[in-house]
Amino acid sequence: MARYTDDSRDRVRDAVDMVDLVGTRVELRRAGANRYEGLCPFHDERTPSFGINPAEKLFYCFGCGTGGDAFRFVELTEGLDFKGSLERLADRYGVQLEVVEEDPAAAERRRARERLLELLERTAAFYARFLWDSREAAGAREYLLGRGLEETSLREFRVGYAPSAWDTVLLASRRAGFSDRELVAAGLAQRAKGAGRTYDRFRRRIMFPLCDTRGRVLGFGARAIGADQKPKYLNSSDTALFHKGRNLFGADIARAPAAKAGSVLVAEGYTDVIALHQAELRNTVGLMGTALTDEQVGELARLAPTVLLALDADSAGQDAMLRAARVATRQRLTLRVVPLPVDADPADLVQAEGASAILARVEASVPFVRFRVERELERGDLTTAEGRGAVISALRPLFAELTDEAVRQELLRLVCDRTDLSPNILSPELPSRGRSRPLAPADNTAPALGRALSAAGRAERTFLAHAVALPQAGRAALADLDIEDLFTEETNRRAALHLREHLGSPTLDSSGVDAPLSELLAELAVAGVRPSAAALEAETLKLKIRSVERKIKEAQHAQSGDVAALVTRRHELGRERDAAIARAMEETAAAR
């Protein structure tokens, strides 16, 4: 895989117009000399809490805590990794990327990979032309259109047809300069046992290109057109490019809509995905089989934070949902289930009921925990005391995982209705971690630095925001402070150490591994703190006062004789702080 030079990355960053880039997703309005704000594209809100700093080319949302640089913005909104976002921005702003000089072996591997990608791309184009232009593919066209799939949608997904002859792709690829070895390596051909004759792997089948999120063809899913063909579905074999358990069908097309919607809809079949896209559910992807792997869940997590499972209602589909939940827990994904009738897949529903009906089903999705509770209720024998007891035993660990008391109460009512047991009986039997906790207050989206931190942590971040707003004085203040002593929150401490050396250019690349630090630096740069030397001095003194107060408590606990001197120092710092605050208020009044 090509690696680009640091200079290329810097030139892309310099070329980015942050207002232009973010403005494609967010309606921005100026909110200060170096700040624009708008409604956050990463969570629902009515009051703007999302802002950008166009000079530093950073964004941050004080509502959901998401932030970073231009590369990170593209990663989140378009579902790309850092390399993909770099390439996307380079293309958008006309920057030529330079590849790091490679050793001969690595360069040869890259060239070999690029040839396989070219071969697969050429073959996908050939299959697509053959589907629409050949007499042999008439039956395939009739099948696809008969399922309610439109030609424009089929062309968008580059659906094609592999002819029945055993050597069509083989001969065409040879004429284009590709070797039999490359055809086998790409998964397009295979060698017969014994004689070693090479022949096309896919013949007389409808072809669905399987792409990465950048739209590069890595392999194919192939559906038999005749009843005599086995198996019904045949995928590319695992190659250097394609691994069945890693990819999601349609991820390249669904990537941007999923990022915008904040959710990704998962179906099973290729035609299901295309039908759902036709129904304007453009955030839909498909599985290659019903077993959802760790790698596929990782891909879903990169597309969106919420996954809607529209899998078949049969036992295989329900088992797939349970496997998805086990894997998704490690990825911190929110899982919801779209209710589907038994013996009807999404493509059938779209054709039979129309787009509005399937949209209504998606909007009626339920939290995965409710699906699990309903599944246990449906599977259990609720006609006997023993059966009801078994169901309650099965539900107990599900309720124990709940942290939201409101969700618990809703599910408890459901179980009561289905088992004919009173809440007084069931409630003690089905406790949860969230039981007796008060409901969380409504989200206040007004900007507040470090809202989830302790008072000390918030004070540290407020100081850092003032230091960033006033770089020269901030650099002097940071140089004079004992950061290890004054900063109690680890990320704040690492930010202070970073800013001490890099206050003129405080950001980190989103390519780095320190995401918490990168997001905090973005938050500080977008905070919009009014530059004020007196305010910076006041925030510095607040940190020192907190440090002295901690030492007073330690001395009192140790019954040390230093308490009196520390208390005196606390009063001195307090007087200095009050004076600095008074000057800061005078500066603010004068500015008005």
Image: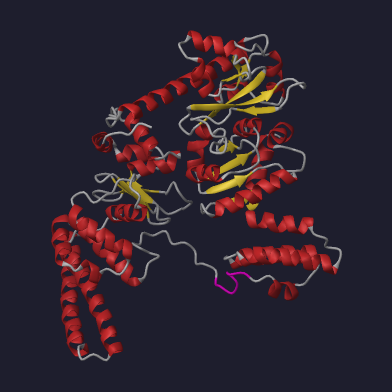
Residue 557 x %, y %: 31, 88
Q: Residue at x 19, y 84 (%)?
A: 566
Q: Nearer the viewer, residue 556 or 546?
A: 556
Q: Nearer the viewer, residue 348 or 441?
A: 348
Is residue 530 visible in the rendered image? The answer is no
Query: What span is in magenta?
Result: 432-438
Residue 487: name its quadrant: bottom left
Residue 34 x %, y %: 25, 48
Q: Residue at x 77, y 43 (%)?
A: 342
Side of 512 relative to 185 (left or right): left
Instruction: Specify the quadrant that holds the N terminus.
Output: top left
Above or below — where is 483 with respect to 320? Answer: below
Residue 124: name its quadrant: top right
Q: Residue at x 55, y 31 (%)?
A: 238
Above or below — where is 322 with respect to 162? Answer: below
Residue 476 x %, y %: 13, 61
Instruction: Specify the quadrant that holds the C terminus.
Output: bottom left
